[in-house]
Amino acid sequence: MTVTADAQQFLQAGLDQTPCLVIDVDVARTQYERIAHAFAGAGVHYAVKANPEPPLLRALVAAGCQFDVASRAEIDLCLAAGASPGDLSYGNTIKKSEDIAYAYARGVRMFSFDSDMELDKIVTHAPGSSVLCRVLASSDGARWPLSRKFGCVPEMAAELMKVAALRGLDPAGIAFHVGSQQLHPDRWEPSIATAAWIFKVLEQSGISLRILNAGGGFPVPYRTPVAPISAFASAVFDAVRRHFGHKPPSLMIEPGRYIAGPAGVLHTQVVLVSRKSYDDEPRWVYLDVGRFGGLAETEDEAIQYELTAPRGGPTGPVILAGPTCDSVDILYQHAPYDLPLDLAAGEVIRIHGTGAYTATYSAVGFNGLPPLRTVVSP
Ligand SMILES: *Cc1c(COP(=O)(O)O)cnc(C)c1O
């Protein structure tokens, strides 16, 4: 659900009806420009799943961004925003045959895979396309890890790329993702070394790969600062130089959180402040948004957003929870959060840095609560 409003209505819409995610497209554009500048020469593909708001996609198209898509709907959104199909990479390694055919019919020619069955599907439904094979990567150091769900071991990637070449596909390169909100710039190097090894092995079979897709994972500051994007770019460029030497590949990156995260502020209302006994500390603060309303990344308190209250004054510790009848709908009970001592029902709290992985994660109607509404700044 999107409401586009002019400057005045915009604040109104954001504050009057909570919960509401307010997206500032200029911030996302600036984030794109920052990462594109830091990674000069690399193709920057925005991971659409982070936030697919049409005005945001249009601004990114205008700024020269390319896109990482994972479904038909994301393809349609990008094309409707003015992207050309050649700027889309279908990066999901888990695709239905008909979705591959759909993408191909719309002109998408770059697909990722990590298994022989997926390769089969691409051969059949997207003949002649360029393919990236995704390798397993460690998510150590990432606040939102990706585990072993995606990718295969390097030996298998090399074999699969040989098969891809034999079956008429364009064996373009190797992809990996080091986990989202990856705090450590040096975590890209092991996968870059792995990719270089695969490039070398295939070179011996007469197959020249050309693309290194270093994925997303670039972090944004929530309650704690993170290294600047230039530190991540230097680490990646240094590792490429070290492992590829004189024949550097074309670099591709797929930031999602980095571009969309800082662009969002979630306005939420206090529904209830309570205690479990008359002398109980801390207070429980129930908001009108929670785990099911878009704050899925508070699971295990992995992502700890910055909160601001409307007024100053003395504060005290709180446990923060959402409004639903599910007991996992608790945002923070271990991480220390403080809110004003006289906090009352109806007051609006702002949750910062919520532009990525929020609206897309919100349930459609759990407990009858509507999905998170988004307002885009003009
Ligand atoms: C989600 C995703 C990304 C974006 O990851 P961030 O951590 O948000 O930068 C990039 N590439 C692929 C294939 C993804 O699935």
Image (spheres, grey):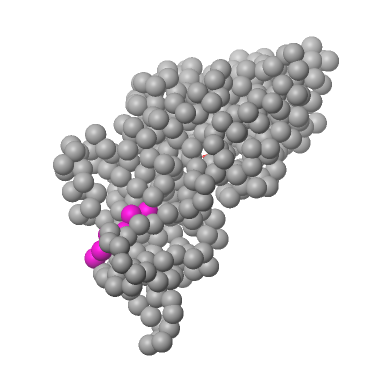
The image quadrant that residue 73 belongs to is: top left
**Relative depth, front residue between 139 and 38:** 38
Residue 312 appears in the picture as rendered: yes
Q: Residue at x 30, y 45 (%)?
A: 22
- Residue that lies at the very extreme toward the bottom in this rendered image: 278
Residue 238 place in picture, x, y as percent:
69, 26
**Residue 234: % across, % down:** 63, 28
Name the residue: 45% across, 23% down. Answer: 65
Instruction: Please give left or right for residue 17 compared with residue 47 in the image.
Output: left
Q: Does the magenta portion include 150?
A: no
For the image, the number of numbered tags is 0
What is the x, y in percent for residue 30? 40, 30
Q: Quadrant of the C terminus?
A: top left
Region of the chain picked out in magenta, as a range: 346-351
Q: Quadrant of the N terminus?
A: top left
Q: Is residue 246 left or right of residue 362?
A: right
Which residue occupies the extreme right position in the image? 204
Q: Main secondary structure of the magenta part?
A: strand
Could you say which is closer to the camera, residue 106 or residue 196?
Answer: 196
From what the image shows, is residue 17 above or below residue 344? above
Q: In the displayed image of the protein, which residue is found farthest to the left?
A: 8
Q: What residue sits 30% from the left and 62% below the top?
A: 312
Quadrant of the rendered structure where residue 121 is? top right
Q: Is residue 149 visible?
A: no
